[in-house]
Amino acid sequence: MFKRNRQRGFTLIELLIVVAIIGIIAAILIPNLLDALQKAKQKRTVADVRDTGTAWMSWLTDQVGAASAGQSGPKVYVTTGFSQVSYSELFNYLHPSSTFFYMQEVPQLDGWNGPLAFGANITALVNSSVMIICSAGRKGVPEGTCHSNSWSVQPFVSTDYDQDIVWADGYFVRWPK
């Protein structure tokens, strides 16, 4: 009689089941991966803004005798009377010579590659409102302009990546909680 010599392999059904399982796993993991990427951009922006603000506050304290950083701020932060500070101006403040600098690399862009905005009210040193640094978050466009707006001082939900991140006078005005 005839004996079949059949090599054992995968059937089409078995292959389709494996592909379906891989698809389900990918559908579960991809949103988490995308959220982790946005969270990393947000954390980088917060760190860059904090570092730049601390360096700028150090420069301001040395140069014009501003109030010390970290004082408790108002419930609403108003930035009327502020003028915009360009990146090149801020870089010159924080990097006055090749041997002395307050910050080695001054960031120009936030984590989403949007421009950071800088504002100052250096002439009104009697007020506690002296400087501000803003990131528009993922949306790329701030709710107003960094140097003429008002923000309620409060955190926001950390998964809302479209919120403005605002640092002013030694503390965060708007930040992810």
Image (spheres, rainbow, N blue to C red):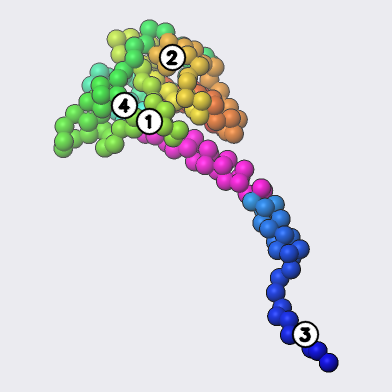
Q: Would residue 131 be found to the left or right of residue 151 on screen? A: left
* Residue at figure coordinates x 54%, y 26% from the top left: 162
Foreground tag (4 vs 3): 3
Q: Would residue 10 be found to the left or right of residue 74 on screen? A: right
Q: Earlier in the sequence, mark 2 or mark 1?
A: 1
Residue 45: x percent and y percent? 44, 33
Q: Which residue is mark 2?
A: 145
Q: Which residue is mark 3?
A: 4
Q: Is residue 92 magenta?
A: no
* Residue at figure coordinates x 16%, y 37% from the top left: 99
Rendered image quadrant of residue 7: bottom right
Foreground tag (3 vs 2): 3
Q: Is residue 80 visible?
A: yes
Gap in Å between the C-alphas at discs 3 and 1? 69 Å
Kind of residue sitting beneath label 4: Trp
Helix, strand or loop status at disc 1: loop
